[in-house]
Image: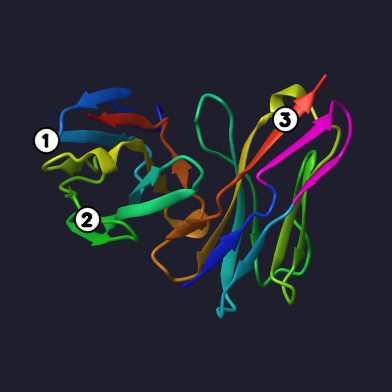
Amino acid sequence: NAGVTQTPKFQVLKTGQSMTLQCAQDMNHEYMSWYRQDPGMGLRLIHYSVGAGITDQGEVPNGYNVSRSTTEDFPLRLLSAAPSQTSVYFCASSPPGLAVETQYFGPGTRLLVL
Amino acid sequence: AQTVTQSQPEMSVQEAETVTLSCTYDTSESNYYLFWYKQPPSRQMILVIRQEAYKQQNATENRFSVNFQKAAKSFSLKISDSQLGDTAMYFCAFMKRGSNYKLTFGKGTLLTVNP
């Protein structure tokens, strides 16, 4: 049981480049989400999914796309990276049932956009 | 929209002593959850403790306990017998029940435990 995994750990992009941040969980969690963390701020929700085939926007969705084709994976796509997207990105998942409101976080991906 | 405020950007405590971190929140909801997350230098987000708003009893987890004052919209975290490994950023977070599990975070408090 690896929990929530994220790849890569660190990435440098040039403005305008695209990339996909990977997130996977092996706990059969229905709910998955993406947050970004900027200096001096708490985490802010980008996108979330309540199950395969279902996604929705969070607080700061602009510039990001998501899809959820399987329960295990929830990739985050940056179509045209901008310096404002320099941040640390966290993926999280929640189990079904009584503990559904308790989210487990991945180790984060640090992204630098030049 | 809900807001979460942590008024102490930084705090320090001596090893083995007790420290309390403050958190206030603003909401018109009656059913919600509150959380404290710990983020050590590794940047991993670790759940410390959670509280359901409908429960009057304050949650405790070993050396960690909360003082939940629903009317005052206050949710402080007390760490007893502080250890060097408690050095971390601590985030207070709010989740409205039935909100598709969306967390709203405060800006965090950096806690340093000194030997």
Colour scheme employed for the rendering of this structure: rainbow
Q: Mark 3 packing: few (<14 Cα in 10 Å), some, or many (20+)?
A: many
- Residue under the point 59% across and 72% down: B26
Residue B9 rendering spot, x and y as whole percentages: 65, 45
- Residue under the point 89% across and 33% down: B17
Q: Depth check: give the residue in front, A54 or B16.
A: B16
Task: Name the side, left or right, on which B76 lies relative to A83.
Answer: right
Residue A29 rendering spot, x and y as whole percentages: 36, 47
Q: Chain of mark 1?
A: A
Q: Depth check: give the residue in front, A11 or A40.
A: A40
Task: Name the side, left or right, on which B38 lies relative to A99.
Answer: right
When the figure is inspected, residue B22 is found, relative to residue A82, above or below; the finding is below
* Disc 2 target residue: A62
Q: Mark 1 packing: few (<14 Cα in 10 Å), some, or many (20+)?
A: few
* Disc 1 target residue: A18
Where the N terminus of chain A falls, by quadrant?
A: top left
When the figure is inspected, residue A105 is found, relative to residue B95, above or below; the finding is above
Q: Chain of mark 3?
A: B
Rounded to the nearest whole Å, what is the CA distance between mark 3 and mark 1? 38 Å
